[in-house]
Structure formats: C-alpha cells, structure tokens
Amino acid sequence: SYLDRLNEVEDKVKSYVTVCEEDAINTAKNIDERRAKGEKLGPLAGIPIGVKDNICTKNLKTTCSSKMLYNFEPPYDATVVSKIKENDLVILGKLNMDEFAMGSSTENSYFQKTKNPWDLDRVPGGSSGGSAAAVAARQAVFTLGSDTGGSIRQPASYCGVVGMKPTYGAVSRYGLVAFASSLDQIGPITKDVKDMALALNSIVGYDKMDSSSAKIEYPDYTTALGQDVKGMRIALPKEYFSDGIQSEIKEQVLNVAKEYEKLGAIVEEVELKTTEYALPAYYLISSAEASSNLARFDGVKYGYRAEKYDNLLELYKQTRDEAFGTEVKRRIMLGTYALSSGYYDAYYKKAQRVRTLIKNEFDAVFNNFDIILTPTVPATSFKFGAKTDNPIEMYMNDVCTVPINIAGLPALSMNCGFDKDGLPIGVQLIGKAFDESTILKVAYAYE
Ligand code: GLN
C-alpha cells in the first residue's frame, strides 16, 4: 500500500530519485514467509522506509543527486543500511537532495525539484528535501536524512514533520558520502515523536568502521516517552528570537514554551552571545572540509567521466567542470581558498576557535538547563527560485540550526503550528550530548 501511495503522488511531489519496487516487494514477501515460519524478526519488521541518496546502498544507485555519481552503485551498504536490513525493514528507494547535501531547498539536485506537499509551488527545504517531503506525503513510514548544518531539521520544519539530528558520534557515518566530516550526522525523519524514538533505536550504536563513533551504552528511546516534564528546566536563548525571525514563528514557539510551563516545566530566558558567529564559522569550516572530501571525485574512481581529454590533468578538470553543479563548485572554491597557505590562520583556524567558544557557551547553559528551545528556521517555506540567485540569503536559512552541528549536540524539530498561508512552523529542541532521551521525552509531552 505504501508503494501504491508512493506512485500515486510521486508525479506531484518528486521526492524519490530511485524507487526499487521489485526489491521492496521481494524483501517484504521474504519477511512474510519468515514470519509465517515463526522466525524471530526485528521490532520494526516490514516497515517501509526511504533513504537519502547520499547513504550508500549495495547494488542500488547512490547519486548524491549529482551528475558526478549519476550511475554509481556502491559495492557495500552504509552501516545504517545494514542495520535497517538486519532489523527487517523494507527500503522503498532513494530520496532526492541538494547535490552532495549542499543547499537548503533541494533545488540544487541534478535530477529534479522536489515539491513541498503542503504547497507544490514551494520548496520542501533541504538538503534532505526528498526525505522530508516523502514522510509528509506518506510515501514512506519514515526516512533517513543527513544533517551537516540543518539538513534534517530545516526540511522537517518546512514539511510539518519530525526530524532529528542525533549527537555527533551516536550514529555511524560509515557509508555516508562525506560533505563536512566534523559536522555530518545521519538521522531519521518521521511523522511523529513516537516513530522518532523507534527509528532512532534502529540506527544508533557504536561502529568500529567510523572512527568518530561513540562507544557508550545507548538506551531504548521509547522508555522516555510519556514521562513527566514537571520541574524540567527549559532555556529560551534570546538571540534566537531576534527581529530576523518571522513574527508568527516567534509567537508559536513562545506558545510551546507556555505549554511546557503549564505542564510544570521552568522556562527561563538565557543568552547565547556567540550565536551570530555560528553561520560564518559554519560556512567556512563546512566548505573547507567539503573541498577536501570532494577531491576524490576525479573521473577515475567513481561515476561520471568526461568524454574528451588529452591528458590526465584534463580528465580531472573536464570531469569536475562538467559534473559538479554551481553550488558545489562555489563551496569547493571557498574551501580551497580558506585552506590555502597564507589564509589558513585568518579563516580556517579562526573559525575553529569560534567553534570552541560556541560549544563552551552551550555547555555553560546546559549546566543549568535540560533543554534549549528555539525556532528551527527563521521563516517558513519559500517559492521555487526565490533565493537561487542569492547564496547568502539561502545560507541565512540555517542560522538557527548550524550552531547545533558546530557544538555536536542533538536536536529535534517538530511542528508547532502554521502561518497565515497554512505553511508549517517548526520548533527546535536542543539537548545535552547523548541525551536524546530527554529531547524525546519533552517533545512527546507537547505533541
Ligand atoms: N544548508 C546547509 C548547507 O548548505 C546545511 C546542509 C546540510 O546540513 N547538509 O550547507
């Protein structure tokens, strides 16, 4: 029935780059047979899901929505995909995204424009736009996305669904095509908070294949649901409620805070003075890391190769010129510049220092609070083309989400209302490192 639904609305929404209908049906049949035999199956056996197209799936195209990888079939599964398969979930296909996860609207996909199911003239957000739209349009029970600076939470907010970026280190990135390795995290997008707890259970855990993976005990996240939030301390950082934030968003998020007060939580205003430096630091660090990570795409090892070239250097140059889109080239140039000798100290090193200040400030707030509550985005979804000519305006979408990646913290976005045009508004709950349970508990109490 999910495949029927997927096909019924896909012409309008365009969230999938690849649908693997036959494989999905075969997997589902196999699960049914094993169930009939009384075999023990995973707790989410048979649940149909979608996977962002930068997460490697064995023998199933993984394009990163780029011409560079238009035909790339990985010879292995990402760890999250292995876990999904071991748990007997069913993968329906691969989801559209901004090329190499760079963008905030999914307009940077080489293949197609994914539409926001709430208003087909508007963007679903990005870069995991396909992952968010597919859940909103019920084309999968849940999906996996990746979040380097907001790419799960921002599209979740635009599409009125729940999205979570887990703590850096909680979910293995082995098999995630790297964008900015010190910031990238895989996480789920779901229709509600309960599904989020279940989805998270199925992907977290230590993995020796990812050197940044944390070797700790991971709880069963469903046990957090339904617990009392009385006496919990919730911080509202005033920098996230500035003039740049759409008034309806501020209003709705403050309403959420009031709801928590009614439930017995203690809500207080705090300061996070380094907030304004997070966006420039993010775009420096992420572009620097991207320029290094994307050096591997040279026409030799994977995907696209230019047809005409006279020598090896020409092969590299032609391939990269023809197969990378404008935004990817912009990031590579920015990053290469920031890392070049003579500029490294002025830009990259300085951004890393700013990063430490931002992290310390979050830590200080978390000495006194359990949760930080903010808007997820400064404004609701925009029309196609509205920001494509102005990269800085596009980058401004990420002001509320990038500080969390900079600090490596977990954060969830969930719907908390609609603006006057009927577009979803998201609220962001930020937690302490590896304290996803508290976020889920607090989110569930509101929902
Ligand atoms: N919009 C941000 C960027 O373009 C975040 C992307 C992401 O989280 N992958 O870099």
Image (cartoon, rainbow, N blue to C red):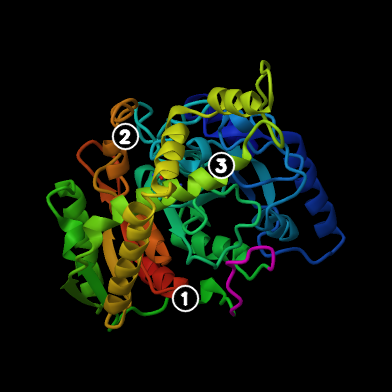
Q: Which residue is mark 1?
A: 224
Q: Nearer the viewer, residue 213 or 318?
A: 318
Tell me: is circle 2 under 8 Å from ligand 1. no
Q: Which residue is mark 2?
A: 391
x then y, percent, for residue 261: 21, 74
Q: Of the residues shown, which amino acid type is indicated by label 1?
A: Ala
The answer to whether residue 151 is visible is: no
The answer to whether residue 310 is visible is: yes
Q: Dividing the image into 4 quarters, which one contains the N terminus? A: top right
Check the image and report above or below for 277 versus 223: above
Residue 294 numbered tag: 3
Residue 367 numbered tag: none
x then y, percent, for residue 363: 33, 76
Check the image and report above or below for 112 versus 357: above
- Is the residue under label 2 in contact with that under label 3 (CB below 8 Å)? no
Where disc 2 sits, the SS reads: helix
x then y, percent, for residue 278: 29, 57
Task: Pick whichever of labels 1 and 3 is earlier in the sequence.
Answer: 1
Marks 1 and 3, how far apart at CA: 39 Å
